[in-house]
Image (cartoon, rainbow, N blue to C red):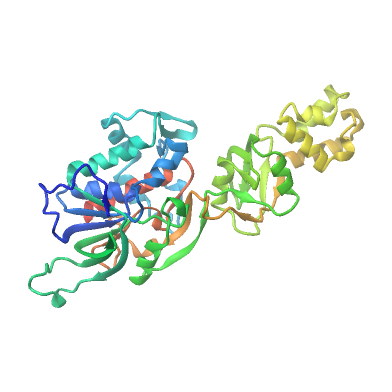
Amino acid sequence: MSSTSAREYSHFHDTSTNSYDTIILGAGAAGLLCASTAAQRGQRVLVLEKSNKVGKKILMSGGGRCNFTNYFIEADNFISGNPHFCKSALNRFTQWDFIAMVERHGIDYEEHKHGQLFCQHSAKDILAMLLNECDRAGVIIKTHCEVSEIETLLSENLSESENPDNRYRVNFLEKGTSTIVDSDSLVVATGALSIPTLGGSGMGYKIAENFGLSIIERRAGLVPFMFSDTTKPLCERLSGLALDINVSCRKESFRENLLFTHRGISGPAILQISNYWLPGDPIAIDLLPTLDASAWLLQAKAEQGKSRLKTLLQQQLPNALASELVSLWWPEYGDKHLAELTDKQMTSIGKQLNNWCLKPSATEGYRTAEVTLGGVDTADISSKTMEVKQQPGLFFVGEVLDVTGHLGGYNFQWAWSSGYAAGLFV
């Protein structure tokens, strides 16, 4: 067993005790914020993390610089079976509250497009801040903890030597030895299925099911697409190329970059739309989102009649992409001058550029997904406190719940907000 904290705070609490006010399962974004909030209220808090390190997802996020929130947090940026559920927590602990904490700790940050906020230096700054908040409040954090059993304690079953105020007993492996701890409140902050190498697991769902809670169907979100048709070799040849596009699916659309990869397509626009895509759905890509491509082509025909189609397209698209599209869609036009093409043909070319219809075969799945859609049904959870309505003292926070944010700092803000809400009420 290793312990992540500057010290175990023996001068605050007797570390030999097996009783705490609150036990938190998971030392990620939501768990750590919840822990510090509860401990600052005077609670005795123990955090159990199954991985060898805390905050792994924090450290890898944003290319190692952690997109920790967004200036423009709205409920519309979140996907849930109950779109109103997230509002209470987001309003109680806002992006401005987290930004104030970042500034109080002297962390330099910068704004990227769409209001996204990143550390100027390293995601380590955010993790260090959270650990410092926990450290100062006396939170005990233990890593390498594998929870084996959770049981509810009924006062009539307790001996006189046991604390009748405790409602939960957690059995976990500590250096191969079974350790038992009791608490009045239990917070499940175990994350979800995305990126298992960073500690993602289904443990939180199993706990929920054991307590009779419903689980909304889960699937990978913020994830690249793959193809099995002729699009796959095209993507392979264009791998590494990025361009600004607009992508649409199921009446949702996003304007951002697309990135071609060896397996298919990725980039911010694709990750965003993947949250709305279901197997079998087509997606529509506008390669020239700032142009009515048909009108532009017709004007070019009138003004540059001796130009060739590929040459013209290279004025607006990367050269390699323009060449590939001409070979794929209009091979018979490749060597013709624009003046040789009819207006109908030019209009048709333009429509295809503004509406490239693709049908992904699948996503890359949880291996590379940044989030997990679905999760613990919010109908069973208090939106004010994150407590299970029919199970006093049991709380769920963060990604394990059926609340998923868009790309751009929204999922971290949900972690902070939901963790804070629970921290006030444990």
Q: Can residue 182 be seen by looking at this rendering?
A: yes
Q: Please identify the quadrant where the C terminus is shown.
A: bottom left
- Left or right, residue 404 beside residue 92: right
Q: Please identify the quadrant where the N terminus is shown.
A: bottom left
Near-viewer residue (18 or 426): 18
Q: Quadrant of residue 412?
A: top left
Q: Quadrant of residue 153?
A: bottom left
Q: Position of residue 350 (x, y in %)?
A: 77, 37
**315 shown above or below 157:** above
Picture residue at 7% right of the left edge, 73% below the top? 160
**145 shown above or below 405:** below
- Left or right, residue 281 beside residue 422: right
Q: Quadrant of residue 377?
A: bottom left
Near-viewer residue (355 or 244): 244
Near-viewer residue (170 or 326): 170
* Residue at the far bottom in the pictured view: 156
**103 shown above or below 278:** above
Q: Can residue 420 be seen by looking at this rendering?
A: no
Picture residue at 23% right of the left edge, 41% below the top? 133
Q: Position of residue 70 (x, y in %)?
A: 41, 37
> How many marks can you see?
0
**255 shown above or below 214:** above
Q: Position of residue 151 (x, y in %)?
A: 26, 71
Near-viewer residue (75 or 66): 66
Q: Position of residue 222 (x, y in %)?
A: 52, 48
* Residue at the far right in the pictured view: 340
* Residue at the far left in the pictured view: 160
